[in-house]
Amino acid sequence: MYMNSRRDFLQKLGASAIMMQLSSMTASGQSNEPVQQPYKGRVLRVAIMGLGGYGTRVAEAMQACSKVKLVGLISGTPSKIKEWQAKYDIPESNCYNYDNFDQVKSNPNIDAVYVITPNELHHSQVIRVAKAGKHAICEKPMALNAKEGQEMIDACNKANVKLLVGYRMHFEPRTLEVIRMRNAGEFGKIRFFQGQCGFKAGDPTQWRLNKALAGGGALMDIGIYAINGARYMVGEEPNWVTAQETKTDPVKFKEDVDETIQFQLGFPGGAVASCLSSYNINHLDRFFLSGDKGFAEMQPSTGYGPIKGRTHNGEIIQPIVTHQTIQMEQMSGIILDGNRPVVAVDGEEGLKDLKIIEAIYRAVKTGQKVFLKA
Ligand code: NAD
């Protein structure tokens, strides 16, 4: 199912999301779309687990959704729960802490839990959500390794609940336009992808620089966007990996916490990808895709936006959206209506990235080319 035009795309959105989009459109975007009727279908009732930086952003973005509502909170900090309850009008009966959230099982007013905690916690928390019979949305990286990722998929399958990973770029209109063009053959045979993702990590005490909580360093957190992007931009799964690490600050970036990794991916169709993942380089947010007949260049490519890009045909013009609003709106359709997104966001999708991350770390350690199973 491909969303071939901007109109198709808008028709898949709820009314408030459309209003939000129209009001935020660039001068170069058209503004004469029909105003849609208010959404009257089912609403996905979500509890957020982990009321930190990204949880805050997701909650704010969800206010513009019509198919999703924030109805519950899971946090270890009672004062945050109180603050969020007041802000989002959340009843006491929908608030939990990390010890008692299994009780969400007997709460008929919550459909799904969005896990937005440090990476190490995703595995056990998603499994507990599944055992409580609720759908799970989990932030990236889905887990610390492929074994954990598989266990999360198995737990959700067993409980007959859905597992989605917070890959917000899979719903971003300009990204989807490049994917549409590629599928339509407009770039010709794809030969090359370049993905550069990084920023300077600040506070040396943050969990992102703690191997136990983060599972690694920049690759787990930001390099994953280059891996995931290589896959959705080339449109194939890589079959080999090579990688090299550079560490300039071994005090800040301890053992197994990667600062900068360059990696290369090879694809069955012959395309290669050259990627950079860093916690020590700013302004690194760029994708380049090259085919026999054309190219796409995006910068920023995976930041919160607006995403900007051009192809051999000129500037990519699509609505500017709040990524988390559109992600949650579309995830409601995936969970409640069985909709299929253009680019998958299920547990299997998260697992594919984890397998490549493991292969990159192995390639760094061994200096060898690592082959991936098809
Ligand atoms: P954060 O540090 O701002 O928030 C983490 C939250 O988890 C805090 O509220 C903290 O109190 C809570 N927490 C619970 N148990 C904890 C523990 N044992 N140690 C530390 N904190 C604990 O982090 P964040 O930026 O919100 O990231 C959370 C998750 O979201 C990560 O998996 C990250 O990769 C992901 N993320 C995704 C995006 C995206 O664009 N998709 C952006 C940012 C973060």
Image (cartoon, rainbow, N blue to C red):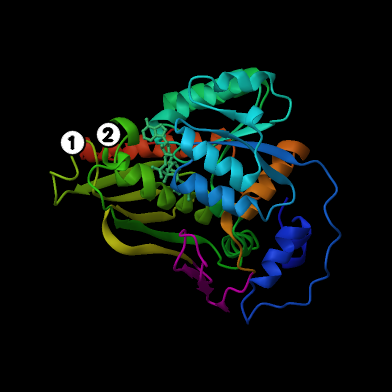
Structural crowding at the residue carrying mark 1, measured as other residues with C-alpha within 10 Å and reported as few (<14), some (14–19) or many (≥20): few
Left or right relative to 264: residue 321: right
- Between 353 and 15, the one lying in front of the other is 15
Is residue 144 visible in the rendered image? The answer is no
Given residues 68 and 319, the one toward you in this image is 68
Q: Is residue 250 left or right of residue 155?
A: left
- Residue 188: where, in percent of width, then height? 56, 65
Question: Callout 2, which amino acid?
Answer: Lys
As drawn, 160 above or below 372: above
Q: Mark 2 — residue? A: 211
Q: Is residue 294 magenta?
A: yes
Q: Tell me residue 309's x, y (percent).
A: 51, 71
Horizontal side, residue 177 vs residue 366: left or right:
right
**Residue carrying label 1:** 255
Q: Is residue 257 magenta?
A: no
Q: Secondary structure at mark 2?
A: helix
Indicate the quadrant of ligand 1 in the picture.
Answer: top left
Q: Label 1 near label 2: C-beta < 8 Å?
A: yes
What is the magenta range? Answer: 291-318
Whichever of labels 2 and 1 marks the residue nearer the N terminus, that label is 2
At x 47% / y 47%, what residue is drawn? 54
Q: Please state which of residues 280 and 154 is positioned toward the viewer in this rendering.
A: 280
